[in-house]
Amino acid sequence: MAWRHIVVLCAAVLGHSTAARPQALDLRNLSGRSAGLAGAGSASVDDASAVVANPAMLSRLDRVAVELAARRVDRGPALFSIDGTFEATDLEEERTVAAAFVGWRAGGSDGRLGVGLGFHSPFESQTRWGLDFFRRFDTRVETIDIEEVSAAVAWRIGRWSFAAGPRYVSGDLERVTVMPVGSPIATGFRGEADVRAIADVSAWGWSVAVDHQRAAWGAALVARSKVDLRAESKGAEVELVDFFLADEGLREGALEVIEPQLEFLEGFDWPLAFDLPLELRVAFWAAPHPRLSLHLDLSHQEWSEVLSLTPRFNFRQRFPIPFPQQRAFDDTLAARLGAEISLSAAWRLYFGVADEESFVADRIVDVGLPSGDSRILAFGAGWEHGRFGIDAAFAEVDIDDLVEPAEVRDTTLSTDRSELTISLRLAF
């Protein structure tokens, strides 16, 4: 295929990028092959995405390998309801996430040293409640946009491979918080202001991996460190969005009272944080038949150790909830099982199922994060000719509804999504 056609195809896939939508931190969709296996395949990854999925496999690549991947996520409306009282729907949205990787094994087919470099987005999320209903929540808008550059060096000793490397994670955190302003209710005027705080965050992390390969089976252990992403906004943008006044004749005097409060909110340094968790992953593969291979990945993420100072999305009580609050997340375990079938020297089929626990605690109401545990059904196909290959996969993600019982009224949060992943592979 001509280079011009490859560039056109990549542009067509990546050109539809829109606002980010919620995703758990995982490695499921860094390549079309991995997506087709529902996230399994780390122990047998044979492309440049190994720099993130399993850096130890860099020592087994074919000289120089390049991988370009794009994932399109279609998320259904996120329905939030308070039983018998309110019902609201967060807008249905789509997004595209891109990734690029390059790997190189020195010395050709007999080389033992492998190096790799990759760029991807480990976490992106956006929540945007409308003003009509969700002023009753402390946080109305939250955006988490994080990108990562990973590098690794791998060394092979017989059937064993070892790898380590740094990770540089950076991005933007945004929060719009509804804050009460005005005077005591007895004076007859009060209001609410949107406080928009933005901060750039960046930090270093690391990844290590060990891998053992046999002719008909293999195993790998991958660890990725916790990354602390914390900063202060150094001021904020403040907008008065609601203002109640019993007597319009007192409006000018009321605004004179409120304006100093708005100026104070603008000058305050607002803390923002959203850490990435420590991840430990064990992966296996086995080939019971020359044309069939089975893959199993088990991934543990320590979300309970991360810090997030963003206020929780609690329904507004009689008094405002103290600000800021720290979210309480749960540790997770994801199990992913896949099968790869070789139809010919050029064609491969992928099938996979997965069960992923949600790190969001039951008491957190937030459509921007994966509210309930997920079950994934995926399938895909790969084609390879010479130095060029393409993989495509489709995954349907069924997310459990989050129902929080309450003394007066229950709250329910529900949403589902589908994913299309396409990746291009080049070898030199």
Image: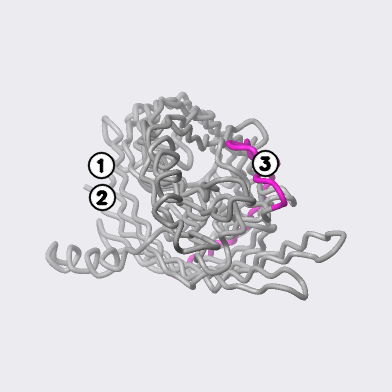
Q: Would you place residue 215 above or below residue 31 in this image?
A: above
Q: Which residue is mark 2?
A: 427
Q: Which residue is mark 3?
A: 329
Closer to the N terminus: mark 3 or mark 2?
Answer: 3
Foreground residue among 26 and 361: 361
Q: Which mark is residue 56?
A: none
Query: CB under 8 Å between callouts 2 and 1?
Result: yes
Count neighbours of disc 3 (C-alpha within 10 A) and say few if under 14, some if 14 to 19, many if 20 or more.
many
Foreground residue among 137 and 291: 137
Q: Which residue is mark 1?
A: 64
Label 1 – label 3 distance at C-alpha: 40 Å
Q: What main secondary structure does the magenta stretch of the protein show?
A: loop
Q: Would you place residue 127 above or below residue 323 in this image?
A: below
Q: Would you place residue 156 above or below residue 190 in this image?
A: above
Type of the residue with mark 1: Val
Label 2 – label 1 distance at C-alpha: 6 Å
Q: Which residues are magenta?
A: 317-344
Closer to the N terminus: mark 2 or mark 1?
Answer: 1
